[in-house]
Image (tube, grey):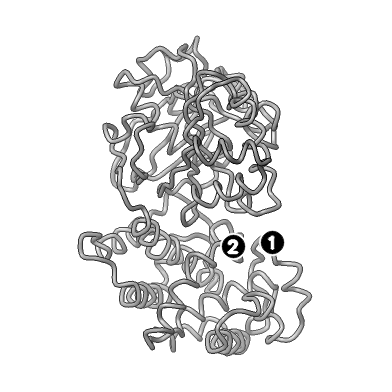
């Protein structure tokens, strides 16, 4: 896109709220994974801290692609956040919390080992927590360098959609560390768990053009997001004063993790797969589809009955708020985008609820229907004579090669899945293949 680029020099003429703090303080936070979610979430919270006088500038590291560096470096790491809501026009926000960016593992190790670094955060997607991921080795190398230099350990806080992501990352790091480093890491390095929430769809060229027209400057790193944002994190003395900028600090993170994964992420996935089944392109179109909405509301009721959240969690109100957020047509979240990586996501979003429902003798048909719709999309199976739009999935090639429906379901769910649920998913796949979207009538 041609035109004058957002930068420190041009910031004063930007038609947006702009930073009023010193961006030159050495970064205390290192963030791995400088994508759209980070920019709209941690970047804005850090921006708020800086506005209140707390030194919370960020050194960003992209582990693989140089795209983020190419977008951000020419504009002094400034970027714009546009909040997209149907009812309210919110001023653009120029965020200055990110003050440097680099790419690659060596840059990450150097940044984490810097004396001023006191906190390391990550948004590197669920797959980066696998045993084969290089992220744990990278952290081990960086922590070992700090240990050798006699520097104190940083606090490490993953911000990905995982149950107890901090604890999981800690186990991966401990497994990758040599004995001397492992003892120091176990004793000195805090890993804290978080629950993060903000819907941030991928930025399109038309988004960038619209933001440039409103901003008066070109911003290749701009992001769009809903107004809503949330961050719940385990209390720890080494954290900055996040409570001052709206972050909820809690002693027990687990119920907040379950509430978000089961009452927001699970229906989000359901809307994606059932939307594909009914010919919807976006999540907003999916939730506006009468058949889909009835089924997803019933699915949420199933989850609420099975999970039995404590009253102070306000789970029913949280679930209702989530469904209303999905109605926002300006976000443009596509069903294909939300439906990607279902083999990883559904393990935490739906299958734990399945286990609870089976123990309680509650219905599992709607849960099975959502899993079946994912299988049909990921495996390229014909639904009433037509294939659904394909979704990216780590198991995609195996699912497509599996053959008959029993083999596909076994490949999708593994051999350890409850046989009653496996049978329900087989039946749901067969029903979808035969009846297509008409199968939603029986699931309402």
Instruction: State the residue position of label 2.
Output: 344
How many C-alpha atoms fall within 10 Å of the one at disc 1: few (<14), some, or many (≥20)?
Answer: some
> Gap in Å between the C-alphas at discs 2 and 1?
8 Å
Q: Does 222 appear above or below 422?
A: above
Along the viewing direction, whichever of 272 and 45 lies nearer the viewer = 45
| Lower position in the chain sequence, tag 2 or tag 1 | 2
Q: Where is residue 192 in the image (x, y as percent from the top left)?
A: 44, 43
Q: Quadrant of the C terminus?
A: bottom left
Q: Does 174 appear above or below 415?
A: above
Q: Position of residue 225 (x, y in %)?
A: 43, 43
Q: Which residue is drawn at 35% across and 46% down?
A: 232
Q: In which quarter of the image is the N terminus?
A: top right
Q: Where is residue 432 in the image (x, y as percent from the top left)?
A: 58, 84
Tell me: 203 left or right of 193. Answer: right
Residue that extends furthest to the left in the rendered view of this protein? 311
Q: Quadrant of residue 388?
A: bottom right
Q: Quadrant of residue 337?
A: bottom right
Q: Quadrant of residue 60?
A: top right
Instruction: State the residue position of label 1.
Output: 394
Q: Which residue is drawn at 55% across and 70% down?
A: 279
* Residues marked 2 and 1 touching at CB (< 8 Å): yes
Disc assigned to residue 417: none
Q: Does 280 appear above or below 195?
A: below
Along the viewing direction, whichever of 289 and 397 lies nearer the viewer = 397
Q: Residue at x 67, y 45 (%)?
A: 176
Q: Is residue 34 visible?
A: no
Give the SS element for disc 2. Answer: helix
How many C-alpha atoms fall within 10 Å of the one at disc 2: few (<14), some, or many (≥20)?
Answer: some
Along the viewing direction, whichever of 206 and 366 lies nearer the viewer = 366
């Amino acid at each position: 896109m041609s035109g004058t680029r957002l930068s420190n020099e041009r910031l004063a003429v930007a038609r947006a709220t702009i930073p009023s703090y010193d961006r030159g303080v050495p970064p205390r936070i290192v963030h791995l994974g400088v994508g759209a979610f980070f920019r709209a979430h941690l970047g804005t919270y850090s921006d708020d801290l800086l506005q209140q006088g707390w030194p919370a500038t960020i050194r960003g590291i992209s582990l693989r692609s140089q795209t983020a560096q190419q977008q951000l470096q020419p504009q002094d790491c400034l970027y714009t956040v546009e909040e997209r809501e149907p009812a309210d026009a919110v001023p653009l926000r120029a965020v200055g919390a990110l003050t440097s960016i680099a790419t690659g593992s060596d840059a990450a190790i150097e940044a984490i080992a810097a004396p001023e670094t006191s906190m390391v955060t990550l948004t590197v997607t669920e797959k980066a927590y696998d045993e084969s991921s290089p992220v744990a080795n990278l952290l081990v190398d960086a922590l070992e360098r700090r240990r050798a230099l006699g520097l104190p350990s940083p606090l490490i806080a993953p911000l990905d959609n995982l149950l107890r992501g901090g604890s999981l990352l800690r186990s991966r790091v401990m497994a990758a560390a040599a004995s001397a480093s492992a003892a120091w890491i176990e004793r000195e390095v805090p890993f804290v768990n978080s629950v993060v929430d903000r819907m941030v769809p991928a930025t399109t060229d038309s988004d960038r053009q619209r933001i440039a027209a409103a901003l008066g400057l070109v911003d290749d790193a701009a992001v769009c997001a809903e107004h809503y944002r949330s961050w719940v994190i385990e209390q720890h003395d080494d954290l900055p004063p996040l409570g001052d900028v709206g972050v909820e600090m809690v002693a027990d993170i687990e119920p907040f993790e379950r509430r978000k994964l089961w009452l927001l992420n699970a229906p989000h996935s359901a809307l994606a797969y059932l939307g594909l089944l009914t010919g919807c392109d976006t999540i907003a179109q999916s939730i506006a589809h009468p058949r889909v909405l009835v089924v997803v509301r019933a699915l949420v009721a199933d989850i609420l009955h099975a999970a039995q959240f404590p009253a102070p969690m306000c789970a029913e109100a949280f679930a209702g708020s989530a469904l209303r957020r999905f109605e926002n047509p300006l976000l443009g979240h596509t069903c294909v985008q939300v439906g990607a990586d279902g083999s990883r996501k559904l393990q935490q979003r739906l299958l734990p609820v399945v286990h609870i429902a089976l123990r309680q003798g509650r219905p599992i048909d709607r849960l099975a229907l959502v899993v079946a719709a994912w299988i049909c999309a990921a495996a390229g199976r014909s639904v009433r004579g037509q294939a659904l739009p394909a979704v990216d999935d780590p198991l995609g090639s195996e699912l497509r090669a599996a053959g008959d429906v029993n083999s596909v379901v076994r490949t999708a769910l593994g051999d350890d899945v409850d046989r009653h649920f496996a049978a329900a998913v087989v039946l749901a796949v067969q029903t979808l293949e035969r009846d297509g979207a008409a199968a939603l009538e029986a699931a309402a």
